[in-house]
Each structure stands twice: as structure tokens, then as C-alpha cells.
Amino acid sequence: MNKISRFCHHLFMTSAAARKAFPAQALQTIQAAVAAGEKLHRAEVRLIIEPALPFGDLLQGTHSRARARELFSLYRVWDTEENCGVLVYINLADHKVEIIADRASGRALLPADWKAVCKTMTDGFARGLYEPSVLAALEMLNGLLHQHFPGQGGSANELSDRPLIV
């Protein structure tokens, strides 16, 4: 995608488009899947959906990965007891999914694992299947996190399970 095309995609991608892709019921279902997964493992998963980059970031040529890192810090996904926070960032305008993991979770899973979770979503998004793709990816992610951070029962919920549209 060239710079002009990317710029146009971001300018015309609105929060209404994000709500169409992820209506309230879908967000509730996704929230329940995050909460259910966190009962299986000790990691903390935070899902953030962004229709388009902020105008200033777009002008600076910021890429989705850099924006995901910024949100990882801003929403303190790194600030968990066991350093096992995981941000799943969806940028609708760029058609990108990025996963930023804290130290413990980042070391535990292989790069191919993270890529497979992202690919599950992007492949589904290409077919217009937003909610089912996120749910399938969360199931995969929760399974992987369970292997490395099995639940010990009663662990505190350190990050909100509610998907956030920014």
C-alpha cells in the first residue's frame, strides 16, 4: 500500500466502521472469551481495536507495530505481577494485527505462535469475519498461554477484559 492510499484508508476509517465490525454484542462475547481464557492461565490479555491511527501518527509515518508498543505502555499492559501481559492490537485501516508481549510471555512463546494467532485474525478479517476470527485467535492464544502459564485458581484480574475501541 503506497503512502497516499494508506493516508486515505486512515482518513476514511471511522469509529462507526469499527462499531460495525465489532458491534456491542460482539465486544461482550469477546470480553467473555478473554475472561474465560484468563481462568485457564495466569497471563493477562488486553485487546485494543483502533479504526485508524491518530492524525499526527499518520503524518509521521507511524506503523502499526510502533502504535501497538505505544498503547502497550499507555494502557500499562506491561505492569502485571508476573510480567505476562499480552496486548492484541487491531488496526482496521492498515488491516494489521500486532501482538506485544511482556517479558515473561514474550520469552515463553515462539514467534511462529504469535504469527499464527495474528494470521487467524487477518485471514478472517479479509473475509469480513471479525468476531469469529477474534474468538478463534483468542482460543488459540489462551491455549498457548495455558501451556506456559497454567492457572493456579483465584489469581487477580490485573487488566480489564473488556475490548477497547480507541
Image (cartoon, grey):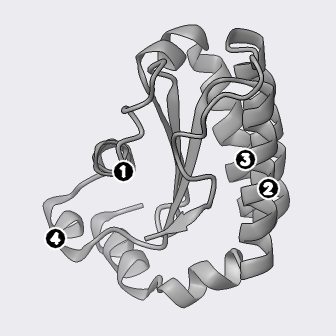
Callout 4 crowding tier (Cα within 10 Å): few <14, some 14–19, many ≥20: few
Disc 1: which residue: 75
C-beta proximity under 8 Å, tags 4 and 1: no
- The residue at 65%/23% (across/down) is 42
Above or below, 56 against 20 in this view is: above
| Camera-side residue of 145 and 79 | 79
- The residue carrying mark 3 is 34
Name which of mark 1 and mark 2 comes first in the sequence. 2
Point out which mark residue 32 bears.
Answer: 2
Q: Residue at x 47, y 82 (%)?
A: 13
Which circle's residue, 4 or 2, is located before the other in the chain? 2
* 148 vs 19, nearest the viewer: 148
Mark 4: secondary structure: helix
Residue 161 % position (x, y): 63, 52
In the image, residue 141 above or below residue 134: above
Is residue 26 positioned above or below 34 on the image?
below
- Mark 4 belongs to which amino acid? Gly
Q: Earlier in the sequence, mark 4 or mark 3?
A: 3
Marks 2 and 3 close (CB-CB < 8 Å) = yes
Instruction: For residue 127, say whether it is visible.
Output: no
Query: Left or right: 137 with respect to 91?
Result: right
Is 92 left, or right, of 147 in this rendering? left
Q: Is residue 111 left or right of residue 26?
A: left
Instruction: In the rendered structure, find residue 56 and report the number of the disc placed on it.
Output: 4
